[in-house]
Amino acid sequence: MLPWVGQTIAEDLAQTPGQTSGPFYPVPEIAKQPHSDADLTRRAADGPLAEGEMIDVRGTVVGIDGRPLSGAIVELWQACHSGRYQHQADSNQAPLDPNFQYWARLVCDPEGAYRFQSIIPGKYPGRTPHIHFRVVAEGFPELVTQMYFQQFGEANQKDGIYSRLSMQQKESVTVSLAKQEGAARLQGDFRMVLARAATDRATPPMP
């Protein structure tokens, strides 16, 4: 039985820590981009592949009580293999990848699940490799956070944004990638836990 069905969870899940969206959120916004499907490794189904190590990330979006948030919108954006964002404000001189999609907009299924294919982003100057996320679910505060990769442990610890997190928070946003038997790509899981919905908050006592 799933933990939210017919029983009370003794303790709420830890909320995924909010982090900066950074200066490179796409312009125009992702919802208005012509290409924003779940496969960032190419711009068209029959187009050439982007450079970089391919990854397959699955995850769920849930509330702190563990309930899946069906229909939650997950936006993500990242640098390409060279470490550059497709954004006019990025002064990085590394080359852009014309075959990489750079962002995606996903809708969680009834189990709160989402999935996307991408590449491990290159190291942007001054940062450890990471992927940005924005999650919007009806009735919940918006979450903006970042996902990191366990394989870059030393670089993660030197990252000014990552290093400010508590140990528990670091574990919640750090993904371990592995290649399962028969799989063509590295795979990982990234669960995001949203703060309690406003309607679930305790009503303050009357004065």
Image (cartoon, helix red, strand yellow):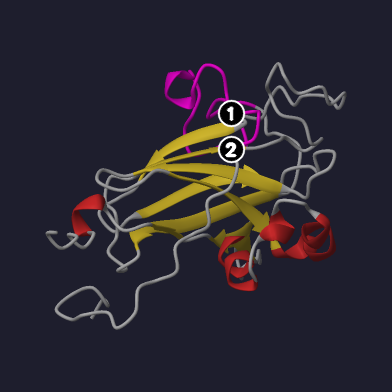
- Neighbor class of circle 1 (other Cα within 10 Å; few <14, some 14-19, many 20+) is some
Q: Which residues are magenta?
A: 21-47
Residue for point 35% across, 73% down: 12
Residue at the image position 78 percent from the left and 50 percent from the top: 128
Asked whether residue 184 is in view, the answer is no
**Label 2, label 1: how far apart the Cα atoms are:** 7 Å
Is residue 113 shown to the viewer in this render? yes
Say what amino acid the circle numbered 2 marks: Ser
Q: Is residue 104 above or below residue 55?
A: above
| Image vertical order of residue 43 relative to residue 54, above or below | above
Tell me if 70 is positioned left or right of 164 in this view.
Answer: left
Q: Quadrant of residue 86?
A: top right
Residue named by callout 2: 21
- Which residue corresponds to the image point at 53% horizontal and 57% vertical from the top-left? 17
Q: Residue at left 49%, top 22%?
A: 29
Type of residue at label 1?
Tyr
Left or right: where does residue 106 sit relative to residue 120? left
Any magenta on residue 38?
yes
Residue 25 marker: 1
Q: Quadrant of the C terminus?
A: bottom left
Near mark 2 (Cα within 10 A), the count class, few <14, some 14-19 or many ≥20, is: some
As drawn, 136 above or below 191: above
Residue extending farthest to the right is 93
Question: In x, y percent, where is residue 94?
Answer: 86, 27
Depth check, front residue: 16 or 203: 203
Mark 2 near mark 1, Cβ–Cβ under 8 Å? yes
**Residue that lies at the very extreme toward the front in this rendered image:** 207
Picture quarter with the N terminus: bottom left
Residue 13 coordinates in the image, percent (x, y): 40, 71
Magenta-colored segment: predominant secondary structure: loop
